Amino acid sequence: MNASASSPAPAPRKAGPIRIAITTGEPAGVGPELTVAALAGAAAHWPNARFVVLGDRALLEARAKAVNVDWAALLATQPVEIEDIPLGTRVQAGKLDAANGRYVLALLDRAIDGATAGEFDAIVTAPLQKSTINDAGVPFTGHTEYLAERTGTPRVVMMLAGTGARPLRVALATTHLPLKDVSAALSVAGIVETLRIIHHDLRHHFGVPLPRILVTGLNPHAGENGYLGREEIDIIAPALASATAEGIDARGPYPADTLFQPRYLKDADCVLAMFHDQGLPVLKYATFGEGINVTLGLPIVRTSVDHGTALDLAGTGRADAGSLIAALDTAVSMARHRRGL
């Protein structure tokens, strides 16, 4: 990623309904049918919002049958429009084909371009298959990194969250790295900037007036006073001191194996974990199928599901649209906060 400065945020749209772009993701996975299922009740669930579905129209119509949705009625009665982007090649549910790798990226590029131009208030992404894109000859690490590169954002933060009045939110100091590279990727400046992003976005996109952020250590027992590692002493604690001096309520570092308890989390707005598999197993155990993924720090709003392409369920109608519905809920809510509605 060569981005060195963040692109300016597009001016929020001032008039008309909230407009949400949905990328339907890997065509062999569950994304297309979950999109159709989630939007079947859009008019009642999201008044004053419109949804632009990016994907192959024929594929979406075929997958509508799998989830028993009347395609013609959906288009006639719901605030949904389809922007037809043709597949690279014919697709079979559950069977990956590298010939569709660039199609998946085309969906994402269209959504990003529309959001940065102010055409869309937010992007919601259905799951994609990284291997398909890489097999198509395009180096690709993940949605989060690609969105950062395309928008020229030097640092973004991956946050997964549950739903409800007091949702569990877990953000990550590092994302898709091998475990052996995590320690070297941590720095005082990087953690401080991550805390700034979380603090800002919780306030301005989620309506949390005074965010409280709990921060894990990296090592077992948060380093045991240096006997099990010094990252807590040399990096994390100084970062917390700097963030606190800026008025950010960030506390820790806490041992990750004991932090995720109600007595610690009851007054917390977010947990910052040091690496992917430190925080996300707990979050997914508590919320899987109803949780969401949000990319913080972008100049645009982006939410996603908390699961993958579920190739074994594609085309069967058995996949649960709960996470996508939650992602749409959050995208609409964030867009409304951003517009000041």
Image (spheres, rainbow, N blue to C red):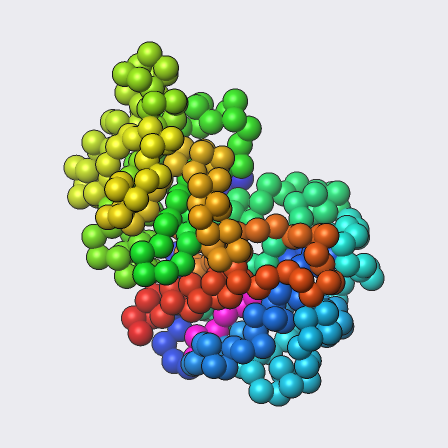
Magenta region includes residue 18 = yes
Between 31 and 13, the one lying in front of the other is 31
Residue at 53% x, 32% y is 177
Residue at 34% x, 32% y is 258
For the stretch drawn in magenta, the main secondary structure is: strand
Classify residue 172 by image quadrant.
Answer: top left
Between 229 and 321, the one lying in front of the other is 321
Magenta region includes residue 95 = no
Classify residue 272 by image quadrant.
Answer: top left
Between 91 and 112, the one lying in front of the other is 91
Question: Percent x, y for residue 310?
Answer: 67, 52
Q: Is residue 124 visible?
A: no
Question: Percent x, y for residue 102?
Answer: 71, 53
Residue at 63% x, 83% y is 75
Residue farthest front in this picture: 262
Quadrant of the snapshot with the C terminus: bottom left
Q: Can residue 63 be seen in this view?
A: yes
Question: Percent x, y for residue 242?
Answer: 22, 33
**Left or right of 122 in this view: 67:** right
**Left or right of 82 in this view: 51:** left
- Please count the marks in the image: 0
In the rendered image of this protein, does residue 214 appear above or below residue 294? above
Residue at 61% x, 50% y is 308
Question: Percent x, y for residue 207?
Answer: 28, 61
In the rendered image of this protein, does residue 133 appear above or below residue 333? above
The magenta stretch spans which residues?
17-24
In the rendered image of this protein, does residue 335 appear above or below residue 292? below
Residue farthest top in this picture: 227
**Left or right of 185 in this view: 26:** right
